[in-house]
Image (cartoon, rainbow, N blue to C red):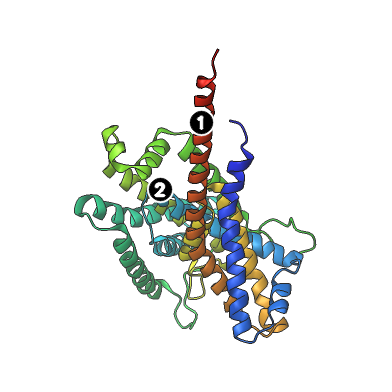
Amino acid sequence: MTFDPRKAGLTLAAPLLAIVFAVLVTSIVLAAAGDPVGTVWQTIFTQPRPRNVVNIINAASVLYLSALAAAVGFRMNLFNIGVDGQYRIAAFAAAYVAGEAWMPGKLNVLFSILVAVVVGALWAGIAGLLKVTRGVSEVISTIMLNSIATALVAYFLRQVAEKGSNNIHTTTIPASSQLAGFKLVGDAPNAIYTLSVLAVLAGIFYWLLLNRTVFGFNLRATGMSESAAVASGVSVKKMVVVSMLISGGVAGLIGMPLLFGDAYNYGLTFQTGLGFAGIAVALLGRNHPVGIALAALLFAFLNEQSNSLQLKAGVSNDIVNIMQGVIVLSVVIAYEVVRRYNNAAEQRRVAAQLAASRQAEEVPA
């Protein structure tokens, strides 16, 4: 495969356009509110300290897993909006199992991760079965399953939580199963989550699945044209269910770096909202493993740098949420603009080649 600079440039154009547009819109919002535009951007784009770099890497690894879970469905035109619910119920199940410590040491970690993957897959599989057996839109079913998952986790958390505490949570994971992390960034006092490696492994799995397996080919073919896939003998119903199972399984991994590297239990303070953030990251990264990684780093960088906005610029860090929202909205438009430009350029190129060919035929020998 030869490198095509023009194609690579067009691939990068859409997300770059979206980011530039988001910066312009955010600047207008800041100016309209009377906030110091220059100070805000200076604060956000200040070089992060080692501690902040570690936080960015940790946050990006979790966002990456969330985005991969959404991307599996997107590649088949399935909109798994239920990643957040799948992640929550899987993290709770893993935290409960890990707290019970039915296995010693690191085996407890591996067993809990397996439980998280299975629970996440089964929860997502409900939406897949509803779609193929009753024709229920996965968008509707996964949104409803998010609410059900939240209620179930809240109910069971009250049942297993330690009594007499306002901050209810599952039994804390034994010290032998807690993972200290990697000290890889300068003199940072904090560490990179050990289970951040799950993001790397999941990214490799995602790429191999899509590009080196028959299932991945069928998944992409079904996403491009369901009728053509059926004509080729692909069982679309089977693809829907399996794709949702894989998406939910990856969603089950989202909470594992946090659980074993920081929180050590599942409680009221366990991080939420990661499933919806992953959808935005997947869209920005165009469902490509490398693109998703860059998008996850960007979102994690913005989130981390926004923490000092209130102190240095007197501006709420919610402005970053506005910027991220504009990126998500504008990236869809940017992709369409780039696609139309690419199609028009391709038509001009083909027309020029045809004209040159006709001229060559008209020249007498």
Q: As displayed, is residue 343 above or below residue 301?
A: above
* SS at mark 2 in the image: helix
- In this image, 121 relative to 326: left or right? left
Quarter occupied by the N terminus: top right
- Decide: few, some or many residues near mark 2? Use Cα within 10 Å; few <14, some 14-19, many ≥20: many
Q: Specify the amino acid type for callout 2.
A: Ile
* Residue appearing at x 43%, y 54% in the figure: 115
Can residue 261 be seen by looking at this rendering?
no
**Which residue occupies 51% across, 40% down?**
348
Q: Nearer the viewer, residue 361 or 348?
A: 361
The quadrant in which residue 90 appears is bottom left
Identify whether 98 is placed above or below 168. above
Q: Nearer the viewer, residue 354 or 244?
A: 354
Q: Residues within 10 Å of mark 1 (few under 14, many from 20)?
A: few
Furthest-right residue in view?
Answer: 187
Q: Position of residue 298 (x, y in %)?
A: 62, 61
Q: Earlier in the sequence, mark 2 or mark 1?
A: 2
| Residue under pointer 1 | 355
Residue located beneath label 2 in the image: 246
Dot 1: element: helix
